[in-house]
Image (tube, rainbow, N blue to C red):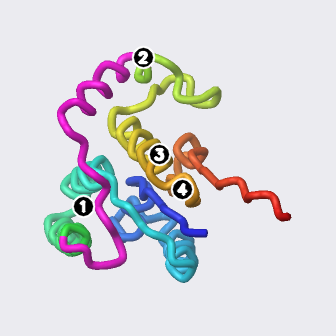
């Protein structure tokens, strides 16, 4: 079975070893190698790219920011050029973004989860969830999951049912 992994910002900052946001870098790196060895397809959603770039620009001294930004640019550029290990998500069109905007106030106003009562779903997370749903529609026979250190996003996992044996 093929697997499709949408990478959340909490994972990408660890893979890029962003100072101050890399507390799980060792475990994330080990998990990445395991997923890669199992031929997982790694998708970089638009929100992950934008949020990670913001975190890098707001982090540490100028020298560290520049070094980290270069690793980020190399990884994202490779994804744009279809070089492994990452692929880009499909960027949304105007109609899709307008649909998300219509949905966003309700998502932001509701508690993200029973344990996160002071926080709603961010627009970035909503866009990653929408990309997950798009993958479900396109690849229903694949395992699809959002790889995140955020338990709310980590809950998005689809494992297709196996057909009954005859």
Which comes sooner in the sequence, label 1 or label 4? 1
Q: Is residue 20 left or right of residue 97?
A: right
First in sequence, mark 1 or 2: give its number.
1
Mark 1 closeness class: few <14, some 14–19, many ≥20 residues within 10 Å: some
Q: Nearer the viewer, mark 1 or mark 4?
A: 4
**What stretch of residues is rendered in magenta?**
81-106
Q: Nearer the viewer, residue 89 or 16?
A: 89
**Which is more foreground, mark 2 or mark 4?**
4
- Left or right placement of residue 55 versus residue 117 in this view: left
Secondary structure of the residue carrying tag 1 is loop
User: Residue 60 shows which numbered tag?
Assistant: 1
Measured in 3D between alpha carbons, the distance from the residue under mark 4 to the one under mark 3, in whole angstroms, is 11 Å
Q: Nearer the viewer, mark 4 or mark 3?
A: 3
Residue 86: which quarter of the image?
Answer: bottom left
Q: Mark 3: which secondary structure? A: helix
Residue under the image location 65 percent in, 55 percent down: 159
Q: Which mark is residue 144?
A: 4
Answer with mark 2 or mark 4, whichever residue precedes in sequence.
2
Residue farthest to the right, as pictured: 166
Which residue position is annotated with label 2?
106
Indicate which disc, 2 or 3, sits on the residue closer to the N terminus: 2
| Residue behind mark 3 | 137
Q: Please name the residue shown 53% across and 22% down the image.
A: 111
Check if mark 4's residue and mark 3's residue have beta carbons within 8 Å: no
- Indicate the quadrant where residue 123 lies: top left
Q: CA distance from mark 1 to mark 4?
A: 34 Å
Q: CA distance from mark 3 to mark 1?
A: 41 Å
Mark nearest the camera among 3 and 1 is 3
**Location of residue 87 with respect to 137 vertically, above or below:** below
Residue occupying the point 26% across, 78% down: 83
Measured as percent of width and height from the top left, residue 11 is found at: 44, 60
């Amino acid at each position: 079975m093929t697997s499709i992994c949408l990478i959340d910002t909490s994972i990408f900052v660890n893979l890029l070893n962003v100072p101050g946001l890399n507390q799980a870098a060792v475990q994330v790196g080990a998990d990445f190698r395991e997923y890669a060895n199992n031929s997982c397809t790694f998708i970089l959603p638009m929100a992950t790219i934008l949020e990670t770039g913001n975190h890098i620009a707001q982090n540490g001294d100028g020298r560290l920011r520049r070094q980290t930004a270069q690793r980020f640019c190399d990884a994202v550029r490779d994804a744009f050029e279809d070089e492994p290990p990452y692929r880009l998500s499909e960027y949304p069109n105007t109609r899709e973004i307008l649909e998300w905007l219509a949905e966003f106030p309700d998502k932001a106003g509701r508690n993200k989860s029973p344990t996160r009562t002071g926080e709603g779903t961010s627009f970035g997370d909503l866009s990653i969830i929408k990309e997950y749903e798009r993958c479900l529609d396109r690849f229903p026979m694949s395992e699809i999951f959002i790889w995140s250190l955020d338990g709310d996003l980590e809950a998005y996992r689809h494992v297709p049912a196996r057909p009954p044996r005859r």
